[in-house]
Image (cartoon, coloured by chain):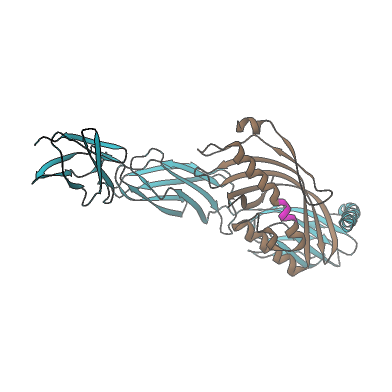
Chain colours: A brown, B cyan
Amino acid sequence: MLRLFLIICTVLTATSASLFAQATVRIEAANLQGSRPLQEQTGRAAIRDYLQSWQALTAALEQNRADLLDPDFVGSAKDTISATIQQQAALGISTRYQDRAHDVQLVFYSPEGLSIEMTDNVEYDLQLLDHGRVKTVQHVSARYVIVVTPAEVRWRVRVFQGTPR
Amino acid sequence: MIARCALLLGGLVIAMSQLAFAVGGRMSSPKTIEAGSSFSMQIAGSGNATLFIVGTGQVIKRDVQLGQPIFFAAGSLYNAGHYLAVLSGDSFTEVESLDVLPASKPASLSFLAKPSRLPVGMHAGITGAVYVFDAYHNLIFEPMPLSFQLSSSTGAVQKRIVSTRYGAAWTEMDSTAQQGMDKFVARIGEIASTRIVGQVPGDPCSLKMNALESGHQVLLVTDAVRDCNGNAIPDGTIVTFTQTFNGSQSTVDEPLKNGIAQVTISAHNGALLSVASGVVMGNQIRWEK
């Protein structure tokens, strides 16, 4: 069932924060390692929560407010992005990451069910502002590796790390 | 909303103007560096500019002198990820990509072993999952061999060597035949992480009781209660004695004490006495005076 769900590459539309913020989402067939079978609902929830975390990421880095990360990020991912926000604030910088397209693949489900790892070939627009002045807007293609872990009611991003495509 | 649109349009105008200036190729930066390593960038021209290195993992801003190399000391850029190097002058902006790769040497393991306590003799009952990080807590993606080893107090060892994939590895182990505290170690190079897995006896096996006359009553006493691997069942485990007579039934629950359970009951002549613990049935005795 899960394979069927993932093999049929579904194009979804993720809700996002602004007028131009509709990212297309493609879900690749899972290439999982791990002994634990991943239920369709679980995989779907993990991907949904990860995609929603981009809204928090965008808002937090744009407004330089680390507290906006709280619902979606935890552990080292939260620490790292929070530190980036502190650096931005200290330097008078803000950045706006507007995700345009995601290509997500699940790659690991830990045997005890406490973490899911996925990759995402993501395209986004990055706007850099220095003391409120736009310095550049760039369209970026990057690959991210994400580890999510379950919290009370949702999956939260614990590792969020870019890697060369 | 209007402000945001204006901001985006402004950005687009700037981006288009950058294209014209980017042809000049003032900036020469490495495409990839290892996390935490020193590196330098060459910037042609003269005058002043501002260099931004921007990513979700880190942000750096420096005033630079064009025509001079820019040095970044070791430890300046240490969070792995995709970055943009943006050079902004009075009349130009130039952008290059820069990937920061995790350091190749592992420095820490995130090791989750489950469960922390389980019965002996369970096939694939113990699981371990590991994520491998470098000294800056970047997940190391490059595949590398990682060993899992489960050692029991009797010296029995199970070992598996697996390759990491996307920085993760996992294994399953059987719980051993002997109760005790086993060491579950994940190791990669010189880095190891240890978890203790408690192995407790399984269900009782061959539960056997004896009936002894004790005045007008009967003393029911079990043999030492052990699991099927010979491990003593812990004291406190409940043993149930049942007497069935003339269609009626009475039961007594007794905890194990010093490995055995015993109870004195008023038994009827011809009663059927039985013993059980959990789902395990013991022997039956027909009481005849």
The answer to which quarter of the image holds residue A5 is: top right
Q: Position of residue A33 (x, y in %)?
A: 54, 38
Left or right, residue A131 beside residue B234: right
Q: Nearer the viewer, residue B158 or B257?
A: B257
- Say if residue A107 shows up in the picture: yes
Taking the spot 70% from the left edge, 60% from the top edge, the residue there is: A68
Left or right, residue B50 beside residue B209: right
Left or right, residue B132 beside residue A66: left
Q: Position of residue B170 (x, y in %)?
A: 49, 43
Instruction: State yes or no: residue B174 in magenta.
Output: no
Q: Position of residue B92 (x, y in %)?
A: 88, 59
Q: What span is in magenta?
A: A54-58
Taking the spot 69% from the left edge, 63% from the top edge, the residue there is: A66
Q: Nearer the viewer, residue B172 or B277?
A: B277
Q: Quadrant of the C terminus of chain B?
A: top left
Taking the spot 53% from the left edge, 50% from the top edge, the residue there is: B131
Q: Main secondary structure of the magenta part?
A: helix
* B173 is higher (above) or lower (below) than B58: above
- Say if residue B78 shows up in the picture: no
* B90 is higher (above) or lower (below) than A20: below
Q: Nearer the viewer, residue A7 or B72?
A: A7
The answer to which quarter of the image holds residue A45 is: top right
